[in-house]
Amino acid sequence: METGATSTGICLIAGCGYVGTRLARRLGGPVLALVRTAASAEALCRAGIPAQAVDLGGGDLPVPGDLGAVVYLAPPGGEGGFDDRLRAFLAALGGVRPRMFLYASTTGVYGDAGGAEVDEATPPTPGNDRARQRLDAERQAQAWCAARGVRWVVFRVAAIYGPHRLPLERLRRGEPVLRPEDTGPGHRIHVDDLVAACTAALTGTAEGIFNLMDGFPWSVAEFTERLAAIAGLPVPRRIGWAEAERVLSPGLLAFLRDRRRVRSHRLAELGISRRPPDTGIRDSLREMGLSSAGR
């Protein structure tokens, strides 16, 4: 277990999926994972991670009496620009006062900056309801913590990739990519670097908003083409916007339309290192039992 990770109580991981499971394994315990389905809870328990299936927005939570920290990783739930799921979750916590509260948000709260640089001091201008829900959740978490004197951390996280989270199937199907000149910089972070950041927040004294990305603003095309080269798969065909709007998914198109160059001036406070995309791709393929082409 990471030294001091949960030394003053249980770490409650709400929305313990891809990231949360790896975080729970790194912490070692004591943790309690909250998930949506009984099947997910049973799978985590078999893996040695205490877990319960709950409706985070249902108002009935198993709140440990010795709660030390809360890591909230669940997606927003609600209508319009409001995260009603987090609101119900915070209300259900009752009068508990954990050491700290960590909320995982997204760099999407900055919206489309027209390719300009944004950092932690840039006012968010979310361009869709999903991003507005994330910003609403950030503010809810901050207000809840301020009312209780609880240390809080908000991570505005770039696109997460890692083992089993690479667009390998799209490459195998021969799906095209939007050419770099038609989109802005891309930002991402390897899942284990995100887990390291979460651990640092839990064990340290950091507080406030942090942008989390690997520092390599490769476009989606550049990242996907590099993945193809390393994995030994055909390089995807580049297309322009006119064709992209016909063949790419609405979700991917919305992601590609937001153009911004994200910077962080606070990452040094966490004391973590971030792997470059080449290393992250190779590490991910290795964990999946796949070979790299060595290019």
Image (tube, helix red, strand yellow):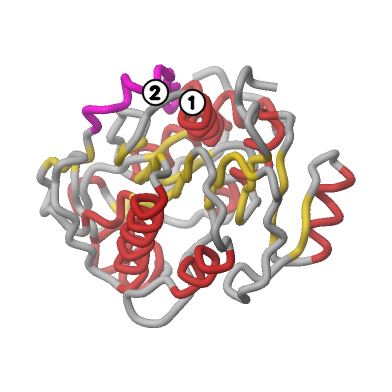
Q: Residue at horizontal 42%, vertical 46%?
A: 159
Q: Are marks 2 and 1 in contact (CB under 8 Å)?
A: yes
**Is residue 140 magenta-colored?**
no
Question: Disc 1 on helix, strand or loop?
Answer: helix
User: In terms of depth relative to the viewer, which is nearer, 253 or 272?
Assistant: 272
Query: Is any part of residue 177 visible from this angle?
Result: no
Vertical placement of residue 55 versus 174, above or below? below
Q: Tell me which amino acid carries mark 2.
A: Leu
Which residue, given by chain and number where applicable, does mark 2 sit on? Answer: 270
Vertical placement of residue 91 versus 166, above or below? below
Which contiguous range is marked in magenta? 264-277
Pointer 2 or 1: first along the chain = 1
Can you tell which quarter of the image residue 133 is in?
bottom left
User: In terms of depth relative to the viewer, which is nearer, 208 or 122?
Assistant: 208
Q: Tell me which amino acid carries mark 1.
A: Ala
Which residue, given by chain and number where applicable, does mark 1 sit on? Answer: 200
User: In terms of depth relative to the viewer, which is nearer, 134 or 30?
Assistant: 30
Quadrant into which the N terminus falls: top right
